[in-house]
Amino acid sequence: MTPPSALTAPHASSLDLGGRTALVTGAAGGIGRACALRLAAAGAKVRAVDRDARGLEELADGARGLAGAIEAHVLDLTDLDAAELAAAGTDVLVNNAGLQLVRPIEEFPPDVFHTVLTVMLEAPFRLIRGALPHMYGQGWGRIVNVSSVHGLRASAFKSAYVAAKHGLEGLSKTAALEGAPHGVTSNCVNPAYVRTPLVEKQLADQARAHGIPEERVLAEVLLQDSAVKRLIEPEDVAEAVAYLCGPRASFVTGTSLVMDGGWTAH
């Protein structure tokens, strides 16, 4: 019988990533920044990847005094060979980088569609491909793909984003099946709208696409299907990512941790 003390010990489910290397994409702001700081606080050496050099510098400054460290790596994920190389030797991989354009399909620029799929689906594939040899070699690894409620549901005017997130869900499940014999888990985290620059920048586009004033977009479009009528904070998403890297999540793989405020309950 398990002693009561073992059930209540405060350290039993704490996240300790001391000695581990984590890579977080899109780390200069929003969810990526919160994830990088959370994993560094748990002791990880974090490779923070983004094309925003100034944002990475500010992130590194904000990490001073944490248990782990943050190393800035300026990288455009459309350079797929460089992305795969950057993931070599990582124990934890957080695929977070994304971009958004709100347009009807008939007006959606094909080059932007291609770029969105490259950054949000093909780059995660290459990053996973680069990380797996090390993870398999040591018999442990954590892949967390920051998906979206749009990996489970579609919305009008977001063809590229929805297609990429649906693809990411399938990639994550495949990585979970292949990684299980090697001690590697792969999961998605699926938030609804998060208080990030990516969301703030689409307000004007949403207003134009739906034919309403910009000040009505939050209530009438972004939060319309959510039972919880507020934006999610990036730190909340980072905590879900941290859970999937922790000791109590070793049996959680091939699934999606939904943080949608009740959106998919409809």
Image (tube, rainbow, N blue to C red):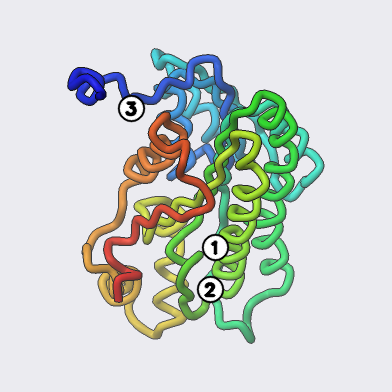
Res 87 seen here? yes
Q: Position of residue 127 (x, y in %)?
A: 69, 42
Which residue has dot 3 on it? 13
Disc number at residue 206?
A: none
Q: Position of residue 254 (x, y in %)?
A: 53, 52
Disc number at residue 158?
A: 2
Q: Is residue 125 above or below residue 204?
A: above
Q: 61 left or right of 222? A: right
Q: Is residue 155 above or below residue 90?
A: below
The quarter of the picture where the N terminus appears is top left
Which residue has dot 1 on it? 100
Please name the amino acid that badge 2 sits on: Lys
Q: Is residue 66 above or below residue 223?
A: above
| Snapshot quadrant of residue 202 | bottom left
Q: Residue at x 56, y 82 (%)?
A: 104
Q: CA distance from mark 1 to mark 2?
A: 8 Å
